[in-house]
Amino acid sequence: MTGGEAPEPPRLRRELGALDFTLLVIGAVVGADVYIVAALGAAYLGPAQLVAWLAAGVLAALIALAFVQCAAICPEVGGAYAYAHAAFGPLVGFLTGWALYAAEWVALPIFPLSFVNYLGYFFADLPSWAGSLVKLLLIVAVTGVNLLGVRAGGRTNDVLTIAKLVPLGLLILAGLVFAALRPEVAAAHLQPFAPLGWSGFGAALVLIFWAYGGFELAVLPAGEVIDPQRTMPRGLVAGMAIATIVYLLTGFAVVVALPWQTAAASPRSLADALGSILTGLGLSPAVGFVLMSLGGLLAIASSPEVFTLTLARLSYAMARDELWPLAFARVHQRFGTPYLGLLFQAASAPLVALVFDLTDLLASAVFFLGIRYAVTALAALRLMAQAPEQRLHLPGLRGALVLAALGGVYLSLQVPPRLIGIGAAVMAVGLGLFVWGGGRWQSRAPWSGEQPVPPWAHRGERWLLYLLRRS
């Protein structure tokens, strides 16, 4: 380096291997949702929720295929934002990233709250101040681990992912043994198969699909994946296949273990299912309750780990492209992590729980989820046309991607009209921020000695550049 040159700024480090990334996908998908969605599915469909679990798995596989194709062509940090940006330009890219960030940011406070709720199984008289302290400690611990580097965050996720699969594996094994040894009881719990009819299928599908969601977060730290063009497509396929099998078998275990009315009314349906199975096999149900409650705690603890690690990479990617405040693109000199994004998430996300109703926010997140998935599927089609040599060699790929796009639209339309209106308003705010921020945030990147035309000034959007320069 010559005396007049500025030192090269720290950059993200490629330290996530194939196993790390596959477990990141599984960890992003198999989380706290599976511990509550089985009860919700039973409330809408009874035993027929198994059909919704299968349909949601097929839809998730189609949408994941779009992410696989995009990752093969554009293995960039930022996930759906990066794919939409590459395919359609910065405006669509920003709105896609805005939808992803808004939905996942407001979801972060759910996990500390749920963690305390499950902790209440072991400490029934937990004071409110102790619960608040546990929430704070969980946020601090997860943020601290991720501040130390992606390797530390990735290794922590590896351990938590494997640990939380153990109780689910025991429930699945117990369910299969129960169905084999007590087939008459299992068959009785399956009858009638659709006691509530099929009118609630759409609502059940949306809720169950929420449990499959999360794989879009795993692709965000692409800039830290070793050999991403090979690792990411393989990891997505393997991770989604494992997650789908786990969910189908978990749903089967709950259905054969409990009458659907019991499952629908249970706040801890998985724990009750394992307890019922053990009782039917002549064993103590207490072991089942404890194991599945511990599993719930592990699942909930691992969910903010994945969300925290990946969400900071989204704000990093958008800031790097000068579509977000540039401070979020700063990387810690020693640890190589986007530390300001991590600190902002830790400080601000818990405040959402004090201001907004989390039920409505989660329902609104489904609206944003569908938008992101539909845009990603369309981006995959566009990128395939731009880089045909990197097209996945799969029969019927284009048709599958079209179905994935339609599936994303279907998910968004299942949200109540009031929440669709709120979601549309949030997207309009994002558009306003793009127009306002694009002209007022610095156009000179902190790591560059030049001041080029902003990277979002694509030929198709020069009208926007003209508008911003006049504002």
Image (spheres, rainbow, N blue to C red):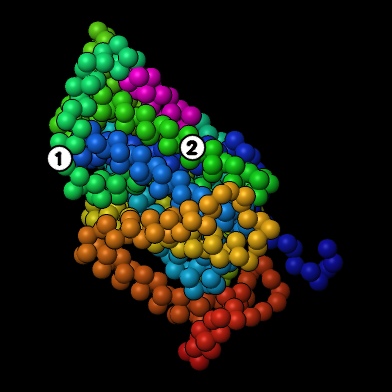
Q: Can see residue 266?
A: no
Q: Is residue 146 above or below residue 168?
A: below
Q: Is residue 295 above or below residue 213?
A: above
Q: Can see residue 179?
A: yes
Left or right of 442? Residue 104 is left
Q: Amino acid at mark 1?
A: Leu
Q: Kindly report the secondary structure that dominates the magenta region of the rendered protein.
A: helix
Residue indicated by mark 1: 196
Task: Write the residue at 73% across / 62% down.
Answer: 8
Q: Nearer the viewer, residue 458 or 158?
A: 458
Considering the numbered disc 1 on the image, is that residue within a helix, a strand or a loop? Answer: loop
Residue indicated by mark 2: 241
Identify the residue at the far top of this view.
Answer: 282
Q: Magenta stretch? A: 160-176
Q: Nearer the viewer, residue 79 or 358?
A: 79
Task: Write the residue at 30% across / 41% down.
Answer: 52
Left or right of 344? Residue 86 is right
Where, by quadrant of the figure, is residue 291 drawn?
A: top left
Q: Amino acid at mark 2?
A: Ala
Q: Nearer the viewer, residue 38 or 201?
A: 201
In the image, residue 95 lies in the stretch drawn in magenta: no
Q: Which mark is residue 331?
A: none
Considering the numbered disc 2 on the image, is that residue within a helix, a strand or a loop? Answer: helix
